Amino acid sequence: MRLPGTTPPSETATGVPPESAAGTNAGVTHHPATDPRTTGSTSAPTPPPAAPERGAAQTAPSPAAAPGDGTAPPQLRLTDVDKTYQARQGEVHALSNVNLTIARGEFISLVGRSGCGKTTLLRILSGLLPPTSGEVEADGAPIWRGNKRNDEAFKQFGLVFQDANLFPWYTVAENISLPLKLRGVGKKQRLARASELAELVGLPGFEKAYPRELSGGMRQRAAIARALSYDPTILLMDEPFGALDALTRDKMNLELQNIHAQAGATVVFVTHSIPEAVFLADRVVLLSPRPGRIRSITPVGLPRPRSLETETSNDFQAIVRTLRTELDEED
Ligand SMILES: Nc1ncnc2c1ncn2[C@@H]1O[C@H](COP(=O)(O)OP(=O)(O)OP(=O)(O)O)[C@@H](O)[C@H]1O
């Protein structure tokens, strides 16, 4: 992930990868893209002539990333991924036949019932957990060779979890820059980077504060800044705002949208909240109950930048309704 202003437009734009349209997941529903800019629709979503381009409202589109033409290069690819845990009570089949291609700079929200395998999928993607079978690639390089992790591929990832996991005895700046310290970066450079990132995530002036002096939302911002410190090109987020109150969560969603637009990273975001998933995503991937399979892939063609008013639009609500109906059908 690069700092704002250094990312060429072609790297921040996304398209729907060809694989996702063709689909190799048996039985996956591919919902049509929705884009009020092209449909003029104020009611239920209708298919536009082309899938939407992320960030079109912020940057001029580049010829290399025309809306929905599938030209944005794939950055992450899951092929026939299966995961079975060997638990004390026996085998737990967590994921089955997951196929997904994620474009560079794309924002993917991952939703599904509790226990359907979202965290498992994120951990496999991030190189924290090997799949039982199947392939996981980042920029064409396998993340796993059998049970051995490809540490080079792993370096591209930034991880953010529900708990900010800041070290209480370090200041905000020291927490943010800790990964750089572990990589041997000098103090002056580390603190300069921490201050830059504190600004990016909305914590300017708090560099010298300790985690106990921050609110929950501020701690999560510091955790996001820490994940960005070493310029990951892929950000994997597991319910990062799950413990926050509704108002703070709305604010964090707006800020994450800005951070994503400015920094240009690919994001995979796990959430239990369908509105949050739709608000943030270029595509929402819905997993079926365990063993998790990709049940549907829904492009979200709402223009960016999105505001809280976006959530009152008919298009937004129609997508949320469709996804909720699919989830309800599982009961
Ligand atoms: N280390 C483990 N050993 C055995 N089973 C596990 C392990 N981790 C997860 N599981 C099981 O795998 C399934 C998927 O778990 P996972 O945490 O991926 O689901 P999830 O969709 O993230 O759930 P939630 O939304 O509740 O966080 C669950 O049935 C869980 O019990």
Image (spheres, rainbow, N blue to C red):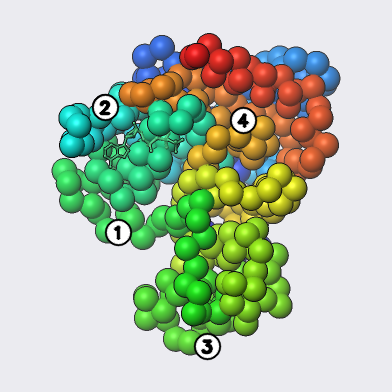
The disc, 1 or 3, on the residue closer to the chain's N-terminal end is: 1
Say whether marks 4 and 1 touch (CB < 8 Å).
no
**Secondary structure under badge 3?**
helix
- Examine the rendered structure and indicate whether residue 307 appears above or below residue 96: below
Residue type indicated by callout 3:
Lys
Q: Position of residue 4 (x, y in %)?
A: 64, 62
Mark 4 crowdedness (10 Å alpha carbons): few <14, some 14-19, many ≥20:
many
- Between marks 1 and 2, how big is the CA–CA gap? 29 Å
Q: Can residue 227 be seen at all in this image of the molecule?
A: yes
Identify residue for label 2. 93
- Between marks 1 and 3, how big is the CA–CA gap? 26 Å
Residue type indicated by callout 2:
His
- Between marks 2 and 4, how big is the CA–CA gap? 25 Å
Which one is in front in this view, the residue at disc 1 or the one at disc 2? Answer: 2
Mark 4 near ligand 1 (CB under 8 Å)? no
Mark 3 crowdedness (10 Å alpha carbons): few <14, some 14-19, many ≥20:
few
**Secondary structure under badge 4?**
helix
- Between marks 4 and 1, how big is the CA–CA gap? 34 Å
Identify residue for label 1. 152
The disc, 4 or 3, on the residue closer to the chain's N-terminal end is: 3
Identify residue for label 4. 274
Name the mark on residue 188. 3
Q: Position of residue 325 (x, y in %)?
A: 60, 15
Residue type indicated by callout 1:
Glu
The disc, 4 or 1, on the residue closer to the chain's N-terminal end is: 1
Mark 3 near ligand 1 (CB under 8 Å)? no
Question: Quadrant location of residue 210?
Answer: bottom right
Q: Position of residue 88 (x, y in %)?
A: 18, 37
